[in-house]
C-alpha cells in the first residue's frame, strides 16, 4: 500500500512527465498518447514558414489576389522584413523617425538627402493619388505599404518611364519578367504602363523575392541587380544582414537601397524633412558630446585614437570583427564627420584598438577603393522621357 506522501509524489511525477512530453512534442514535432488519448504536435516554426511559402507560391501560380485570411497571415511575417532598418523590427509612424531607424542608416543616406531631399519633399505633395492606389494593392497581398517607395526610385512614378535597357512602367519591368508575372507585352499592348496591372505584378514579384531572402533591404537590392548578386554577397560576407554584406554588392544595387531608405525617410519622417536628423551633433567635433550615450564605465574601459581621411565604419567594423551596431554605438557619426573633412576620435576596446593600429593602412586602402568604385560607377540615363530629373539620373 502506498502512503499518502507516496501517492502525492506519484501524481507529481506523472504530471511532470506529461508536461515534459507536451513541451518536447510541441518543439520537435511528435505524436504521443496519454491515458488512451492521442496527441499530435508539429514543429510550429517550420509549419509557419512552409505555410507562408505555400501561400506565396499559390499567389504567383494563380496570378490572383489571395483570400483575406491568408494575406493577414502572411502580413504578420512580411511586416518584420525591415528588421535591419528599424530598431523595433517595423516602422511606427507615431514615433519620431530618428528614434527608431537603425543608427547606421542615418549616416548611410545623409549625402543622398542633402542633394535630393528638396525634390523628394516636393514630390511628396503631388504623389498621394498614386500612393493610395499602390497602398491598396500592396495590402491585398500582405505587403508593407513602405514598398511603394520602390516605385518612386524606379520611375519617379511615371507610367511611361522607359529605361536605357528597355525596362518600362512605374515598376520598371523588363518585358520577359513582365510576361512571367502575367502582364501582356507585345507590339500592340504594353501592360507595364498600366498602374493597376503592373502594381499587381510587382506585388507578386516582390513576394517571390521575399520568400527566398526574408529581408526587404535585400529584396530591394535584388530588384535592382538580381537575386544572384545578392546570394553571392551573402556567401562572401557570411551574413544575411544588409549592413554586413552591402560592400559585397555592386555599387548600383547598394545605392538603390540608399535611395529607397532616403525616399522612405522623406515621405514618412515625422518632420517631413531632414531636420529630424541631428546634423548639429554630427558636425560637432567634440567626441565626448556625441558619445554621451556610453556609460562612464564604458568610456573608462575604452581607448581613443584621432583619425582622419576616407575611413568607412562598415569596413572598419568588418576588419575588426565587430558588430556594426556596436561599432556605431561607440562611434556615432563617424562617416558623416569624416566626410565633412573633420578629424574623428575613434573609440574602441583595447584589443580592438591594437588590431586597428596594426592594420589601419590596409583598412584605409580598402575604404578608399570602395569609395572609388562608387564614384567611378558609370552614369546611366535611366528614363528617356525625363532623364533631366535630378533624382533619377542613375539606376
Image: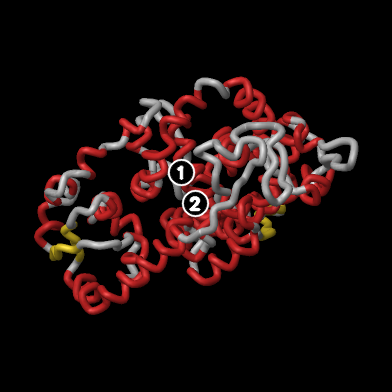
Q: Residue furthest bottom?
A: 358
Which image quarter: residue 132?
top right
Where's residue 10, x and y in %? Answer: 49, 58
Q: Which element type, helix, strand or loop, lies under badge 2?
A: helix
Q: Residues within 10 Å of mark 1 (few under 14, many from 20)?
A: some
Q: Residue at x 65, y 38 (%)?
A: 73
* Residue beneath the point at 90% across and 36% down: 188
Above or below, comparing residue 114 to residue 14 in the picture: above
Q: Position of residue 81 (x, y in %)?
A: 54, 46
Give x and y (percent) for residue 103. 34, 47
Left or right: residue 108 compared with residue 77: left
Q: Residues within 10 Å of mark 2 (few under 14, many from 20)?
A: many
Tell me residue 82's x, y (percent). Answer: 50, 45
The quarter holding residue 226 reads bottom right
Instruction: Kindly identify which numbered label has been placed on residue 244.
Output: none
First-in-chain label (2 vs 1): 1
Reading the image, the residue beneath label 1 is 89
| Residue drawn at 82 percent across, 40 percent down | 183
| As drawn, 155 above or below 343 | above
Residue 48 visible somewhere in the drawing:
yes
The quadrant in which residue 69 appears is top right
Q: Residue at x 14, y 51 (%)?
A: 287
* Above-or-below relation of 177 to 72: below
Circles 2, 1 touching at the beta carbon (< 8 Å): no
Residue where numbered disc 2 is placed: 255
SS under mark 1: loop
Give 52 or 157, whichever is nearer the viewer.
Answer: 157
The nearer-to-camera label among 2 and 1 is 2
Residues 111 and 5: in front is 111
Q: Visible in this render: residue 144? A: no
Amino acid at each position: 500500500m502506498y502512503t499518502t506522501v507516496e501517492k502525492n509524489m506519484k501524481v507529481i511525477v506523472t504530471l511532470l512527465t506529461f508536461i515534459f512530453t507536451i513541451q518536447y512534442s510541441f518543439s520537435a514535432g511528435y505524436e504521443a498518447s496519454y491515458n488512451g488519448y492521442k496527441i499530435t504536435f508539429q514543429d510550429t516554426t517550420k509549419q509557419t514558414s512552409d505555410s507562408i511559402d505555400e501561400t506565396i507560391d499559390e499567389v504567383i501560380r494563380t496570378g490572383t489576389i489571395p483570400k483575406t485570411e491568408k494575406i493577414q497571415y502572411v502580413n504578420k511575417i512580411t511586416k518584420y522584413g525591415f528588421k535591419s532598418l528599424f530598431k523595433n523590427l517595423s516602422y511606427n509612424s507615431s514615433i519620431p523617425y530618428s528614434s527608431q531607424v537603425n543608427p547606421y542608416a542615418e549616416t548611410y543616406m545623409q549625402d543622398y538627402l542633402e542633394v535630393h531631399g528638396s525634390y523628394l519633399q516636393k514630390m511628396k505633395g503631388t504623389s498621394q493619388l498614386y500612393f493610395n492606389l499602390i497602398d491598396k494593392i500592396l495590402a491585398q497581398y500582405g505587403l508593407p505599404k513602405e514598398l511603394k517607395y520602390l516605385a518612386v526610385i524606379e520611375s519617379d512614378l511615371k507610367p511611361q518611364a522607359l529605361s536605357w535597357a528597355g525596362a518600362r512602367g512605374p515598376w520598371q519591368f523588363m518585358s520577359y519578367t513582365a510576361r512571367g508575372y502575367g502582364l501582356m507585352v507585345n507590339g500592340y499592348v504594353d501592360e507595364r504602363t498600366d498602374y493597376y496591372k503592373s502594381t499587381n505584378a510587382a506585388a507578386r514579384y516582390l513576394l517571390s523575392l521575399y520568400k527566398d531572402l526574408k529581408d526587404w533591404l535585400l529584396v530591394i537590392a535584388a530588384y535592382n541587380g538580381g537575386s544572384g548578386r545578392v546570394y553571392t554577397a551573402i556567401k562572401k560576407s557570411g551574413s544575411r544582414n544588409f549592413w554586413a554584406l552591402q560592400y559585397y554588392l555592386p555599387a548600383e544595387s547598394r545605392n538603390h537601397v540608399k535611395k529607397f531608405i532616403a525616399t522612405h525617410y522623406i515621405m514618412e519622417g515625422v518632420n517631413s524633412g531632414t531636420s529630424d536628423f541631428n546634423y548639429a551633433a554630427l558636425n560637432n567635433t567634440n567626441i565626448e558630446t556625441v558619445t554621451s550615450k556610453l556609460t562612464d564605465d564604458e568610456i573608462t574601459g575604452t581607448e581613443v585614437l584621432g583619425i582622419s581621411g576616407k575611413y568607412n565604419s562598415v569596413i572598419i567594423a568588418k576588419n575588426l570583427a565587430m558588430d556594426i551596431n556596436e561599432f556605431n554605438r561607440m562611434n556615432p557619426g563617424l562617416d558623416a564627420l569624416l566626410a565633412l573633412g573633420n578629424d574623428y576620435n575613434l573609440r574602441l576596446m583595447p584589443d580592438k584598438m591594437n588590431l586597428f593600429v596594426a592594420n589601419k593602412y590596409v583598412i584605409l586602402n580598402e575604404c578608399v577603393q570602395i569609395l572609388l568604385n562608387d564614384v567611378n560607377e558609370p552614369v546611366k540615363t535611366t528614363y528617356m522621357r525625363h532623364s533631366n530629373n535630378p533624382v533619377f539620373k542613375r539606376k
